[in-house]
Amino acid sequence: MSQASKHFDFDVAIIGGGSGGYAAARTAADAGLRTVVIEGGEEVGGLCILRGCMPTKALLYKGEVAPRAACGYVGRGAKPTQACNPRQSEACQESLKVGNPRQ
């Protein structure tokens, strides 16, 4: 069968498999529509999930909590579970200074 003679039977086609396309496809499917997602990239997920917003936020969060973890801080408002060693003391104090909203 040639490519031109194929017939596809869907009620709605969603262009893009990113977070918006995923939400649209779920909404359409929940409404009982026969739904297809068309993604031109090699991976489904979109720019935000794979390379943009989410990886950036995870990296920023890791940079924020790494010094706290080194000092034994485990959560918001938590007290150290162990004393910082002298080499880490300055870094620990810097990570806990004013401007950090998680205090």
Image (cartoon, rainbow, N blue to C red):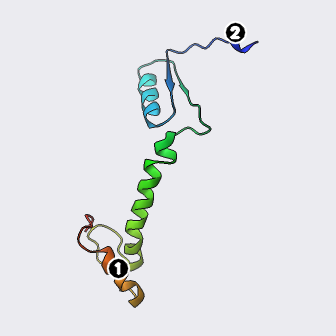
User: Which x, y percent locates residue 69?
Assistant: 40, 73
Q: Which image quadrant is residue 65 in?
A: bottom left
Tag 1 secondary structure = helix
Q: Which residue, given by chain and number where applicable, does mark 2 sit on?
A: 5
Seen at 41% across and 88% down, the residue is: 87
User: Which x, y percent locates residue 102?
Assistant: 27, 65
Closer to the camera in the image, 83 or 93: 93
- The N terminus, quarter of image: top right
Relative to 46, does residue 82 appear above or below in the rendering? below
Relative to 26, does residue 12 appear above or below in the rendering? above
Tag 2 secondary structure = helix
Residue 80 showing in the rendered view? no
Q: CA distance from mark 2 to mark 1?
A: 67 Å
Q: Name the amino acid, label 1.
A: Cys
Q: Name the amino acid, label 2.
A: Ser
Residue 41 showing in the rendered view? yes
Q: Which residue, given by chain and number where applicable, does mark 1 sit on?
A: 92
User: Which x, y percent locates residue 48?
Assistant: 46, 43
Seen at 51% across and 30% down, the residue is: 16
Q: Residue furthest left?
A: 98
